[in-house]
Image: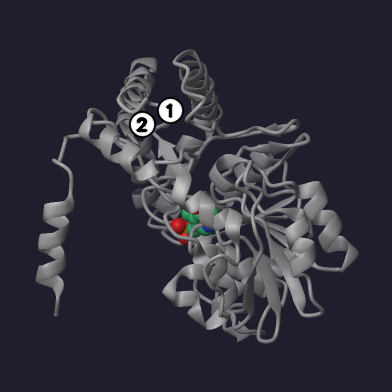
């Protein structure tokens, strides 16, 4: 085992461990503002002793329906399962192809491959980081069963064009809206545009629980009993298995906590959007737009900034500098899925999906959680400015 070797190497190569001046994501600060309500909600569930699905979960589903304007909502155990269940409900399996982006979290393509279908990766639009409809069209074959656009970082993909390409071939569109609850596209919300919308309540999402959770939105009534059966082992009635399903249910404690948080989501999103505007102003005023490419918000879209991801050429040295200044950053995502070991069986190689590969080398996510103040953002931009001041 070479574990020791790699540990020593990491220790030597790591820059002086500067303590971050503030957290990248301040869940603690968020919690302190709603602590009493959260604890009361947990107590309510404990007193009921009803832990899985049930009234608390049904109320959350109703409230998410109202919030998103979706006709139907079915909760489940995670965003990953939401994708899996949505694809199962569409009958995706062996021999099918599903087109998606390689510039995403592993769950998107994982759901496809788990069902024995083949993930077909199409390139992204380098401006928006989202699936390029032209690339989707080129990737279509007679085996294509579905397309999964990912509304990455909180921006809805070019859905009109993607829906047009898919509908022309009778192919279903499943939206991976895990990062984009509350985002709008031409007046409609993320997750309500395709055959199904998949959401995640992982703690780092804009609406995060105290653990895992997920939800599927759909506009099709017939799909609801199917989704509800699939999440309980395929049972339409108790102990009557009509199909093969999985165990993927939302806990009442998660639902109760999410119900406390949902009424705050509008304010939290507005704070993220205000931070984004402030970052743009500060980067422009410091004459940094020569070096830094800002995230875009196309006309008709409302971005919810789950991440504020800039693009820079010397990303790794900038990140090291920011780290040394005590400024926390993250890289979403360091490597595209088509080049990861789990997907070598698909036969992709370096250079096959150029825009996604370039994005992985250049993206850097700056802290943008609602709890940050303008001072924090100014600290971040000042640190970026000192990096470029020493190089020009
Ligand atoms: C978080 C995320 C998921 C998976 O959600 P989990 O709740 O963590 O299973 C899927 N897709 C994207 C794009 C995500 O960001």
Which secondary structure lies at badge 2?
Answer: helix
Which secondary structure lies at badge 1?
Answer: loop
Residue 103 percent coordinates (x, y): 54, 56
| Residue named by callout 1 | 370
| Label annotation for residue 30 | 2
Vertical relation: 115 (above or below) 274: below
Quarter the C terminus occupies:
top left
Cβ(mark 1) to ligand 1 < 8 Å?
A: no
Cα separation between marks 2 and 1: 8 Å
Residue 36 percent coordinates (x, y): 32, 31
Cβ(mark 2) to ligand 1 < 8 Å?
A: no
Residue at the spot 39% in from the left edge and 49% down from the top edge: 45
Q: Nearer the viewer, residue 3 or 182?
A: 3
Q: Nearer the observer, disc 2 or disc 1? A: 1
Quarter the N terminus occupies:
bottom left
Report whether 18 appears left or right of 297: left
Residue 175 found in image quarter: bottom right
Residue at the spot 9% in from the left edge and 70% down from the top edge: 4
Q: Nearer the viewer, residue 391 or 272?
A: 391
Q: Do residues under tags 2 and 1 come within 8 Å of each other at their CB atoms?
A: yes
Residue at the spot 27% in from the left edge and 34% down from the top edge: 321
Vertical relation: 5 (above or below) 152: below
């Amino acid at each position: 085992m070479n574990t020791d070797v790699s540990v020593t190497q990491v220790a030597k190569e790591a820059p002086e461990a500067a303590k971050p001046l503030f957290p990248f994501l301040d869940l603690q600060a968020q919690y302190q503002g709603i602590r009493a309500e959260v604890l009361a909600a947990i107590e309510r569930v404990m007193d009921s002793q009803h832990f899985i699905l049930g009234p608390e979960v049904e109320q959350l589903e109703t409230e998410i329906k109202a919030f998103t304007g979706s006709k139907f909502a079915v909760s489940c155990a995670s965003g990953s399962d939401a994708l899996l269940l949505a694809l199962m409900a569409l009958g995706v399996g062996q021999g099918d192809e599903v087109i998606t982006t390689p510039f995403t979290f592993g769950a998107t393509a994982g759901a496809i491959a788990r069902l024995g279908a083949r993930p077909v990766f199409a390139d992204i639009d380098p401006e928006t980081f989202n699936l390029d409809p032209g690339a989707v069209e080129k990737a279509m074959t007679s085996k294509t069963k579905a397309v999964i656009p990912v509304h990455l970082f909180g921006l809805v993909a070019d859905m009109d064009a993607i829906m047009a390409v898919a509908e022309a071939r009778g192919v279903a569109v499943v939206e991976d809206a895990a990062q984009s609850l509350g985002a709008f596209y031409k007046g409609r919300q993320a997750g309500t545009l395709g055959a199904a919308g998949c959401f995640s309540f992982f703690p780092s999402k804009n609406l995060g629980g105290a653990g895992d959770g997920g939800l599927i939105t759909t506009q099709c009534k017939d799909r609801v009993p199917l989704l509800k059966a699939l999440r309980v082992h395929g049972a339409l009635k108790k102990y009557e298995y009509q199909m093969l399903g999985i165990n993927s249910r939302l806990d009442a404690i998660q639902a109760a906590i999410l119900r406390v948080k949902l009424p705050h989501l509008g304010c939290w999103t507005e704070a993220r959007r205000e931070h984004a505007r402030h970052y743009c102003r500060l980067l422009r005023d410091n004459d940094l737009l020569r070096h830094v490419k800002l995230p875009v918000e196309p006309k008709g879209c409302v971005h919810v900034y789950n991440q504020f991801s800039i693009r820079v050429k010397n990303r790794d040295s900038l990140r090291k500098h920011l780290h040394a200044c005590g400024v926390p950053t993250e890289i979403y995502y360091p490597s595209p899925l088509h080049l990861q070991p789990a997907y070598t069986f698909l036969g992709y190689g370096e250079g096959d999906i150029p825009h996604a590969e370039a994005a992985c080398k250049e993206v850097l996510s700056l802290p943008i959680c609602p709890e940050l103040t303008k001072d924090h953002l100014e600290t971040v931009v000042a640190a970026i400015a000192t990096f470029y001041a020493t190089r020009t």
